[in-house]
Amino acid sequence: MSVSQQVDGLIEMVERGEFLEAFPRFYATDAEMQENDNPPRVGIDALIANERMMLAAFPKMTARALSRFVDGDQAVIRWTFEFVAPNGATIRLDELTLQTWRDDRIVHEKFYYDPVQMRPVVG
């Protein structure tokens, strides 16, 4: 399957809220994920653990891909996310994700966003 088709499949799952289910399908076991210039999380178990932590902190999360670009084994997706905390506080995040794919799996993913967006808006 082409990287373009894989990216489309990933987008579909994430937009449906299938965050955890996307990991075994689209990420390599040794995948790295990095937020801006923070140290990367390494290995699919660490990626899944972080996602579970996010889902526990924000029981309602929605995602929408606004655009995507693919060039060889590189992809960029522009995402908008909305995270709602149990107290109703909302975070809206606009980010770019740069992915490197190998053998139909993401091996490196880096998220670029302005951290100021992480301040909650009172619900």
Image (tube, rainbow, N blue to C red):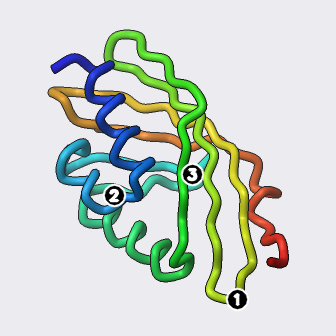
Checking the image for residue 87, the label placed there is: 1
* Rendering coords of residue 51 (x, y %): 41, 67
* Rendering coords of residue 46 (x, y %): 32, 65
Between discs 1 and 3, the one toward the N terminus: 3
Task: Name the residue furthest top.
Answer: 71
* Foreground residue among 35 and 56: 56
Mark 1 vs mark 3, foreground winner is 1
Q: What residue is rendered at 54% in x and 58% in y?
A: 62
| Residue indicated by mark 2 | 18
Q: Does residue 29 appear left or right of residue 34 in this picture? A: left
On screen, residue 102 above or below 71: below
On screen, residue 106 above or below 75: below
Checking the image for residue 35, the label placed there is: 3
* Amino acid identity at mark 3: Glu
**CA–CA distance between discs 2 and 3?**
20 Å
Mark 2 vs mark 3, foreground winner is 2
